Image (cartoon, helix red, strand yellow):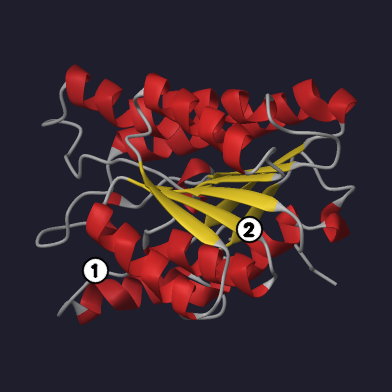
Amino acid sequence: MFDLSGKIALVVGGAGYLGSAICRAYAECHARLVIADWNEERLNALGKELERTGAQARAVCLNCTDSGRTAHLMQSIKAREGSLDILVNATYNRTNKSVEDLTEEEFNRANEVNITSMFTLARQATELMQSGSSIILFSSMYGTISPNPSDYQLPVVPNPIEYGAGKAAINQMTRYMASWLGPRAIRVNAIAPGSFPWNVKDNEAFMEKLRAKSVLHRVGIQHEIAGAAVFLASDEASFVTGHILAVDGGSTIW
């Protein structure tokens, strides 16, 4: 089960904390990888790591808000890989500003990544996809529930409104695109992670608040996102579409 041999997978945001875990898992399942990310240093490091394991992977530096660059990437995939079977878009942007301090321009700029580029990449990817292909977008538990402002007091940065608004939009986009692509037997799903902190340091009080949100009383570990991404990409999920898969330790069941 969960063999991705022969499948071409594009992971956008693939050098990030969760994206890199997905790339490692896809490589272990024998997918051929195209890893796209804006952070060239992290991208190259991941590419070298996977190369040492014998994985088939190539790295592409990408600004996902540049539709011309993303279109060029799709053209290069068509030329080099021939087609595309899996798209994972794990990109996001957030301002970390309070409602009072957030400008309209900042709100729109963040959701150019969170919403517009998600739509553009998915639509472009479908031009290379055949029956049985899979698109996996990234939502968040905060696309379903609202953060409690009392959890995000200084020195913790705010959980900003444009982030949750963008992720709620992804939930609807997932369902809409699943309906649109259903007749072509292309599946569209989303993963909605809960708390997977990677940069919270020396703030045990905040970490305890994150743990308390989960019925498992802990936060997520990087590799725990990978199983959901492998499942949704695989043929074992061939009858799963339009679904928002929560990987949140039960944080959204309260």
Q: Residue at 19% x, 19% y: name it.
A: 105
Which of the 4 image quadrants contains residue 131? top right
Give coordinates of residue 87: x percent, y percent. Answer: 61, 43
Distance of label 1 from label 2 (alpha carbons):
30 Å
Q: Residue at 73% x, 55% y: name it.
A: 232
Disc number at residue 199?
A: 1
Which residue type does callout 2 highlight? Answer: Arg
| Residue 165 sits above or below residue 236 on the image | above
Say whether residue 185 is left or right of residue 117: right
Q: Quadrant of the C terminus?
A: bottom right
Q: Residue at 30% x, 75% y: name it.
A: 207
Mark 2 neighbour density, 10 Å: few (under 14) some (14–19) many (20 or more)? many
Which of the 4 image quadrants contains residue 160? top left
| Residue 102 sits above or below residue 32 on the image | above
Say whether residue 101 is left or right of residue 121: left
Disc number at residue 32?
A: 2
Give coordinates of residue 176: x percent, y percent. Answer: 70, 24
Give coordinates of residue 57: x percent, y percent. Answer: 52, 60
* Residue found at the very far front of the displayed protein: 79
Q: Nearer the viewer, residue 210 or 132?
A: 132
Disc number at residue 207?
A: none
